[in-house]
Amino acid sequence: MQLFHYPLCPHSRFVRLALGEAGLDVRLVEEKPWARRRDYLEVSPSGETPTLLERFGLAIPGAATIAEYLDETYGEAMGERRLLPSLPSERVEARRLVDWFGRKFHDEVSRWLVHEKVYKARMSAEEGGGGPDMAPIRAARYNVKAHLRYVGALARGRRWLAGDRMTFADLAAAAQLSVVDYLGEVPWAESAAAKDWYAKVKSRPSFRPLLAETQPGLPPPAHYADLDF
Amino acid sequence: MQLFHYPLCPHSRFVRLALGEAGLDVRLVEEKPWARRRDYLEVSPSGETPTLLERFGLAIPGAATIAEYLDETYGEAMGERRLLPSLPSERVEARRLVDWFGRKFHDEVSRWLVHEKVYKARMSAEEGGGGPDMAPIRAARYNVKAHLRYVGALARGRRWLAGDRMTFADLAAAAQLSVVDYLGEVPWAESAAAKDWYAKVKSRPSFRPLLAETQPGLPPPAHYADLDF
């Protein structure tokens, strides 16, 4: 399998965690989501990352669609570690939270931080590159607090975000937060429960490759890779 | 079943079409998505529409999550008319397009038109109401052309958007376009193939209730409810 991804794309990270939990080996291919490379548009018409390319040639674009595919194809073999629960009410809750973090958290927090602090520094002038705008960064800093308190509220009532077992919801949320944390923008002091939950996800072996990566010219804060942050 | 919806919310319309195709009766409850009503936040923590309330009390928020739930719960009984295909590659394509229209088309076109032309006229000053801003409306008018050509390109190569049979992808796309069409903002002349495909979806019995509704003070254009537009 190949995964077209970008290292600080939170959706790409979600899929890397899901593949790691499923024990599936994948060859990573770095793709700049802003470049709209012609060959990449063939597999992902939106040009967005990530896209999973299956061994037999099927291209699966989009993190939530990949998650459904992985569950349908490899979920049964995962037994108790399956990432989509079997009860309808628990499936609803896991999908609600995958959508919450992949769309709402992304729209309100991570897309702005990643765009302003990562992508724009790597884009050419024609692509829209340049220095960061502070207005969206400030909005994201304001919004992340409410999201962190929401994670904390969920984590106080449950072992994992969607219930008693780890699901795609935990991986989607942790993937988004990991990118924001890499940029030093998670105010962990807002919620001890959110921090405890994140420490639990962060210590999964599937998380290690993400924590070990650094971006040239953009070092993460010292606590980023620390399991005891 | 009850559906908390807003008449010109495109996600709500997608679910109404899906319920109609499944032959499921539902009581519609109008919910203003901008109001963040306290009781509604109990069933839909994001405050967004729609939310399906199942007979036995399960609340299912979000159109894509509702679609998955409907397929898992009522899909088998639909036989050949099932809205999620069974082949993995076709499931990927249907979900890719549900995401394309529910997220990308919405972000680039319908959310701005609905917000500026519908919601703001109904919101109080404290809620952010007022006259429409032209800049997002102009951006949406520009973006809708490319989306319409994309629908046309898909429709030229296939009977339905995701393949040989009607799927959730057609309903998600038609729901988004129906709201934009209500506002007189679909440049149908851009693509004859897109128009032919839309005429086919629009003539489904599930579409009739949507076409019959009008909003006080905001009449649709004459062609809106015409099956031969």
Image (cartoon, coloured by chain):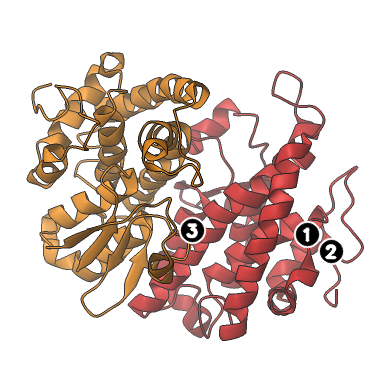
Chain colours: A orange, B red
Question: Disc number at residue B181?
Answer: 1
Q: Is residue B58 left or right of residue B26?
A: left
Say which label, 1 or 3, has the lower sequence index.
3
Residue furthest to the top in view is A189
Q: Is residue A32 left or right of residue A130?
A: left
Q: For the residue labelled by badge 2, is the local secondary structure a helix, a strand or a loop?
A: loop
Q: What residue sits right under mark 2 in the picture?
A: B224
The residue under the point 38% across, 65% down is A40
Kind of residue sitting beneath label 2: Tyr
Q: Where residue A208 sits: x, y (%)?
A: 10, 42
Q: Is residue A80 left or right of residue A36?
A: left
How far is mark 1 from mark 2, CA to CA? 6 Å
Say which label, 2 or 3, has the lower sequence index.
3
Tags 1 and 3 touching, CB below 8 Å: no
* Residue density around tag 1, few if under 14, some if 14–19, many if 20 or more, within 10 Å: many
Q: For the residue labelled by badge 3, is the local secondary structure a helix, a strand or a loop?
A: helix
Kind of residue sitting beneath label 1: Asp
Q: Where residue A24 sits: x, y (%)?
A: 13, 62
* Residue density around tag 2, few if under 14, some if 14–19, many if 20 or more, within 10 Å: some
Residue B14 shows in the view? yes
